[in-house]
Amino acid sequence: MAAAFEQKLEWLKNQGHAPLLKGILHGIEKEGLRVDLQGQLAETDHPTALGSALTHSHITTDYSEALLEFITPVFKQSGDALTFLADLHQFTYANMNGELIWSASMPCHLPDESAIPIARYGSSNVGTLKSVYREGLNFRYGKMMQTIAGIHYNFSLPEALWPEYQVFCENQDRVQDFRSAQYFTLIRNFRRYSWLLLYLFGASPALSKSFMKDKPHALESLDDDTFYLPYATSLRMSDLGYSNKAQASLNICFNHLATYAESLHQAINTPYAAYEKIGVKVDGQYRQLNTNILQIENEYYSDIRPKRVTHSGEKPLHALRERGVEYIEVRNTDINPFLPLGIDQTQADFIDLFLITCLLAEDAEISNCECERIHANHDLVVTRGREPGLMLQRKDDKIELTRWGHELLDKIQLTADMMDQVDGSSRYSASLSAQRSKLDDPSLTPSAQVLKALQDDQLSYEQFVLQQSAAHRETLLQHTLSEEAGSYLQRQAEESLQEQAEIEARDNQDFDQFLAEYLAG
């Protein structure tokens, strides 16, 4: 790994290609529950002043009507994506009638599952499709899991880099195929080493007891309202609330685009007995889109996904097969309750470094044995990551988490040095230094800081996040929304409502026929 990795960095610098990395593209998607001022799940509709959740480009909902999702455009500078994310928060708070955005990944106090509203997208066929899909998630996994929120970090290398890199690699494939293969190299290495991101940025070591209800678990009680694990980093990324034997059988480890796409295709088209028992349309009401292992591609949960922007009406899997991987989506990022946006520039810079390093590192495929080690290391870090002396499995040997982490950071430092040179700054090395401090001192990690705040101030999880959410609301309302940005978001809201009305007016077939054609397409 070391020689090949360092050789690629030297090539980038010596051949004058490193400046191309200024063209890395970034986008951020962030979810957040709407809650009332007492921290209870909002029972109100998605605010009309925000526009249509069906058609708005930047403000929509995820699973629940109360689960906001913000989507930034694509920017060359991650800082611009963060600024736009702040704009979205400010605009939303100004149009939300005093509600709060829950500033953590694990949800607020939850009522009975039946009281969690599934997102509504109007009367059109495409809107009904989105709601029925979510109804299927309810029947398959329950509503509790669907209230968990996170941050998705979208990342792509500049198109100008690929032909140059292909020549260096002496590869004769189509550029599209080469690019896809290299993104899968990035994905495989991400899966090998993403435990480090969970340790450094995991921020969900505790949760409301209302989330667990009567489910069996091994959590400890912190107080009457809070469960936790003393060394956990990211309970959001553990198997709490997420049980899917059907998906576990897929065993996708992302070696090739072709095998990845075929595995998903089979899952989308293979019936599953437990889902057949649920039924599709019962007493005139749809319970799910179909009875297959996956209703659609997006149901497959992974901490990283290969992605491509789709054409109108095109399915994601078809787009990937036809035109290859365009960008990757990192999905394992917790919302940091200490940060107004849940993420900041230092974290974004480190994620960039981590992903560039994963791209340039070894390109070995993942065997079934290594796949099992990856899952085992992931489970250890999310539940026990800050435990002193914790050992992870690396190939045939065990290695202490902190030692392995420092070895990885030593490699990433080489990437940081190159990026600092490109940027004419020291911001990337500064970001890496902040992460190295967390390896040396686990009390600096967000997960440790959350538990310290709960214990020092004798707050329950719900009280702590409510307090943070209210403070962040005040901060974000003070964010300066430029006249141009404010007008743009206001226009988006109005035009999205009009677009939804036009879609509904154009519908000329019943949903049964629409769904049959959609599934056959």
Image (spheres, helix red, strand yellow):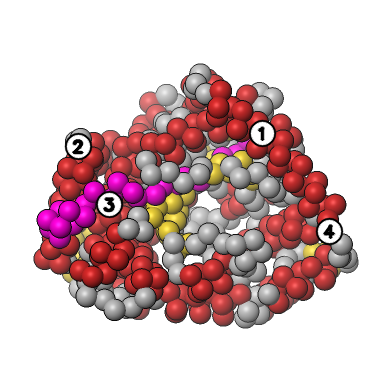
Foreground tag (4 vs 3): 3
Residue under label 1, please give it: 491
For marks 2 and 1, give the CA distance: 38 Å
Q: Residue at x 54, y 44 (%)?
A: 71
Where's residue 370, x and y in %? 30, 73
Tell me the distance, in whole angstroms, between the alpha carbons under discs 2 and 3. 14 Å
Q: Earlier in the sequence, mark 2 or mark 1?
A: 2
What kind of residue is marked 4? Answer: Asp
Q: Which residue is mark 4?
A: 507
**Residue at disc 3, secondary structure:** helix
Query: Would you call the spot at circle 2 few (<14 residues within 10 Å), some (14-19), or many (20 or more)?
Result: few
Q: Is residue 137 left or right of residue 45?
A: left
Relative to 305, does residue 294 appear above or below in the rendering?
A: below
The kind of secondary structure element at disc 4 is loop
Amino acid carrying mark 2 in the image: Gly
- Mark 1 Cα-neighbour bin, 10 Å: few <14, some 14–19, many ≥20: few
